[in-house]
Image (cartoon, rainbow, N blue to C red):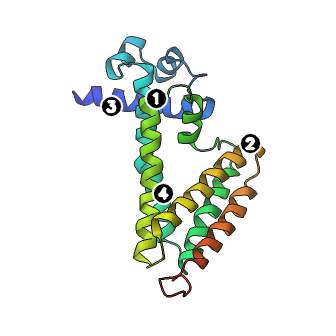
Amino acid sequence: MPRDGEKTRTHILKTANVMFYADGIRATGVDAIAEKAGVTKRTLYYHFRSKDDLIAHYLQSRDAPNLAVFQAWFAETGGDMATRVEVLFTRLAEAGRRVKWRGCAFLRTAGELANMPGHPAIKAASEHKKRIEVWLADEFAAASLEEPQVLARQVALLMDGAFAVTLVHHDAAYFEAAGRAAAALISGAGSGDGGAAH
C-alpha cells in the first residue's frame, strides 16, 4: 500500500475510533465517519471492506495500547502485589471521572452486538479480555500466588463489573470499591505455604 494510502487508512481509523467511542457503533454511520475524516465513502470502503470490518479494526487498534497502559501502571507502582493490583483500579477510577469517559470500548461494543455473536468485533473484544487475564495470571504466577489463573479471572471479573456499574451510575467510586475487593483477594492468596502474597 502506498505511503499516502497508509496515512489515509490510519486517519480514517483514528476518526472512527473517536466517534465510535463517543457515540457508540450503531449511532455512528459510515457517512458521518467519512465526512469527519474528510474522505469519500468510496475511499473509506477502499481501506475497510465494510462498517463491520471498520468496527473490528477499531477494537483491534485499542488492544495493545490498552494493555500497555495497564502494564505501565502496574510496573510503576511500588509495594506488594495487592497494592499494585489496587492501583489499577485507582487509575481506572481517575479515568472514569473524566468528562469524555464512556466506559470500556470492548464491553460497550460487545453489548451493542449481543445479537451477533459471530461478529469479528466480538472476537476482537474476547481476545483483548483474554489477553488481560493471561497477563494478570502471568504476574500472579511470577509472584508465586496460589492458583494464578483463577485469581486472574476473579480480578478480571471485578474489573469488568466495575466498568459496567461505573458507567451505569456515573460514579467512579465503584472502581475504588472493586479495587479494595481485588486487593483483599490478592492478600488472601498465599504462595503455596499459606503465607501472604508478596
SS at circle 3 = helix
Badge 4 or badge 2: first in the primary sequence: 4
SS at circle 2 = helix
Relative horizontal placement of residue 189, taking residue 71 as reference (left or right): right
| Percent coordinates x, y for residue 37 in the rendering | 47, 23
Under mark 3, the amino acid is Lys
Q: Sort mark 4 into few (<14), some (14-19) or many (20+) by Cα contacts within 10 Å.
A: few
Give yes or no for contact between labels 2 and 1 (Cβ–Cβ under 8 Å): no
Closest to the observer: 71 or 131?
A: 131
Q: Which mark is residue 55?
A: 1
Which part of the image, by quadrant, shows the N terminus?
Answer: top left
Closest to the observer: 194 or 158?
A: 194
In three-dimensional space, the C-alpha distance between marks 3 and 1, rounded to whole angstroms, equals: 18 Å
- Confirm whether residue 153 shows in the render: yes
Relative horizontal placement of residue 83, taking residue 68 as reference (left or right): right
Q: Sort mark 3 into few (<14), some (14-19) or many (20+) by Cα contacts within 10 Å.
A: few
Closest to the observer: 21 or 114?
A: 114
SS at circle 1 = helix
In three-dimensional space, the C-alpha distance between marks 4 and 2, rounded to whole angstroms, equals: 24 Å
